[in-house]
Image (cartoon, rainbow, N blue to C red):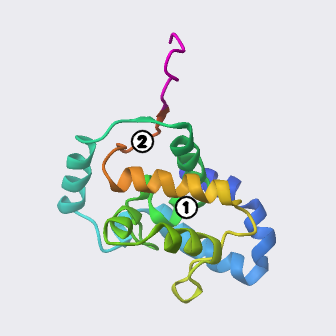
Amino acid sequence: MLKLLTFLEGSEAMARTLGGAGLFGLFVVSWAAFLGPGLGAESGPSKAKATTQEKETGSLQATQEVHDGWKTFHSYCSSCHGVDATGGAAAPDLRKSLAGGLTHDQFTATVRDGRPAKGMIGWKALLKDPQIESLYQYVLARSEGRLAPGEPQVQAAAGSGN
């Protein structure tokens, strides 16, 4: 339920942008993602095993930019791309997309302009370039294994005495 509420809170401006028909389509896709991976191709023991192995690597310590990217991701992207960018019923695992050769420019252009043929809307009306950059930094950290699943914690600045 929390995931659905998070999606709905992040979707108010998007609803105004999309209008009725687009909003209905987004609702259907989001509801499928909310119901979980049992509806998608990745379910069962192999998915559970990958999640368990993934938790053994990385850290939750992150820069402010990566933490901001995590917040943006969970507000706008996780309902389709899955929690922690692991993919969902409606959209791919973004960690694999970056590891597979998706460039920075391709990533940012896709976020801005969307991929209408695949059902992804563009976010340029809602996200500014610094937000898209922090989103990229978050997904990159997840892709490279530097960031474990979960909410990242901002690293204390050097010499802050904390």
Task: Identify the residue position indicated by label 1 in the image.
Answer: 77
SS of the residue at dot 1? loop
Residue 18 place in picture, x, y as percent: 75, 76
Please tell me which residue lies in front, 81 or 147. Answer: 147
Residue 128, label in figure: none
- Residue 23 in view: yes
Please tell me which residue lies in front, 105 or 127. Answer: 105
Q: Is residue 34 above or below residue 71?
A: below
Residue under the point 68% across and 78% down:
24
Residue 162 place in picture, x, y as percent: 50, 12
Q: Is residue 52 left or right of residue 149?
A: left
Q: Is residue 84 left or right of residue 145?
A: right
Residue 150, label in figure: 2
Q: Is residue 86 above or below residue 30?
A: above
SS of the residue at dot 2? loop
Residue 83 location, quadrant: bottom left
Q: Is residue 135 above or below residue 146?
A: below
Query: What amino acid is labelled 2 in the image?
Result: Gly
Q: Is residue 57 magenta?
A: no
Q: How would you rate the neighbour count of disc 1 (Cα within 10 Å): few for under 14, some for 14-19, many for 20 or more?
A: many
Residue 126 location, quadrant: bottom right
Question: Which residue ends up furthest to the front in the rendered image?
Answer: 159
Residue 66 place in picture, x, y as percent: 51, 44
Chain part drawn in magenta: 154-162
